[in-house]
Image: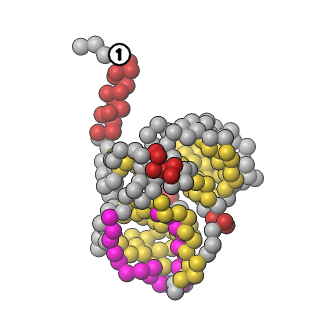
């Protein structure tokens, strides 16, 4: 039987997706990520697999050197993205509209929108990209009705004090891929737990910004510092606490 090159490529692609494994709950360490130099930037593959609500989930980090060329403008046909600035200054352009984001700036990017990322600062720009596709049918109109793509700077958000520190809420909304996508930053100002261990239907990532924490996930304890993150699958019992007297800050975002 003869195959065209396009057919062979499609078969290889489908086979690759079929072989993706479920991502297990646990901790992912920044220092363990492989560093791949590529001209004016560096990439760090982090994870790739499937989860309860997603038939594709991939995460990587990129560092653009000062003066690096912007990423090639492109649109994702059936992939949604979250982009998080770890450090540096990023110019984000989506369908011709640009914003400047600093550290802890976040982009919630809908499918089918042309976008590019550029380092416009005087230091290297490092950012995380989380790419995902839902097991359910994509609903672009739902994402558009909920605000379309968002570009959010941390300093534009109010800080709400809590009994253990404080919270900045980024968004809690529907998207093209998610029935719910919620994201916030929590600060624990002392050696204290954020809350009692709990479980929920949403899958969750906690991405460390500063300080050190311990997280109990289904009876096993993990620790993490800046750049590391915890992954909790749907219905995993988990609870996080600050393990030092100094404040700790982290992103928490979850989806279903």
Can you say which quadrant of the picture contains the C terminus?
Answer: bottom left
Q: What is the magenta segment's predominant secondary structure?
A: loop
Q: Residue at x 48, y 50 (%)?
A: 143
Foreground: 1 or 97?
97
Can I make out residue 95 in this image?
Answer: yes
Foreground: 12 or 28?
12
Answer left or right for 117 relative to 201: right
Q: Residue at x 51, y 52 (%)?
A: 145
Q: Is residue 236 magenta?
A: no
Which residues fall within the magenta stretch?
Answer: 182-201
Can you say which quadrant of the picture contains the N terminus?
Answer: top left
The picture places residue 141, in percent across and down from the top left corner, at 47, 46
- According to the picture, the residue beneath numbered tag 1 turns out to be 4
Q: Is residue 199 magenta?
A: yes
Q: Residue at x 61, y 49 (%)?
A: 63
Taking the view exactly as shown, the residue that stands out farthest to the right is 122
- What color scheme is it? secondary structure
Q: Residue at x 46, y 45 (%)?
A: 140
The picture places residue 18, in percent across and down from the top left corner, at 29, 39
The picture places residue 88, in percent across and down from the top left corner, at 67, 56
Foreground: 148 or 159?
148
Taking the view exactly as shown, the residue that stands out farthest to the bottom is 163
Decide: is 125 above or below 194: above
Answer left or right for 98 relative to 81: right
Answer left or right for 90 relative to 16: right
The picture places residue 72, in percent across and down from the top left corner, at 61, 36
The quadrant holding residue 25 is bottom left
Decide: is 205 above or below 168: above
């Amino acid at each position: 039987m003869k195959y065209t090159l396009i057919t062979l490529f499609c078969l290889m692609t489908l086979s690759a997706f079929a072989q993706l494994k479920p991502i297990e709950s646990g901790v992912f360490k920044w220092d363990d990520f492989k560093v791949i130099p590529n001209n004016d930037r560096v990439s760090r593959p982090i994870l790739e697999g499937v989860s309860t609500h997603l038939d594709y989930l991939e995460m990587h980090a990129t560092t653009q050197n000062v003066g690096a060329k912007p990423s090639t403008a492109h649109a994702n046909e059936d992939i949604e993205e979250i982009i998080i600035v770890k450090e540096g200054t990023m110019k984000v352009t989506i369908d011709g509209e640009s914003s400047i984001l600093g550290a802890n700036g976040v982009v919630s990017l809908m499918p089918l929108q042309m976008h590019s990322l550029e380092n416009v600062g005087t230091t290297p720009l490092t950012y995380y990209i989380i790419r995902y596709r839902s097991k359910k049918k994509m609903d672009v109109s739902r994402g558009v009705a909920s605000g379309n793509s968002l570009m959010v700077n941390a300093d534009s958000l109010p800080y709400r004090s809590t009994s253990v520190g404080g919270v900045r809420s980024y968004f809690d909304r529907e998207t093209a891929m998610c029935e719910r996508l919620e994201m916030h930053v929590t600060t624990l100002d002392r050696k204290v737990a954020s809350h009692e261990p709990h479980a929920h239907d949403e899958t969750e990532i906690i991405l460390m910004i500063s300080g050190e924490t311990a997280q109990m996930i289904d009876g096993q304890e993990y620790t993490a510092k800046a750049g590391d993150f915890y992954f909790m699958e749907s219905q995993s019992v988990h609870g996080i606490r600050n393990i030092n007297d100094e404040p700790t800050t982290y992103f928490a975002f979850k989806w279903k």
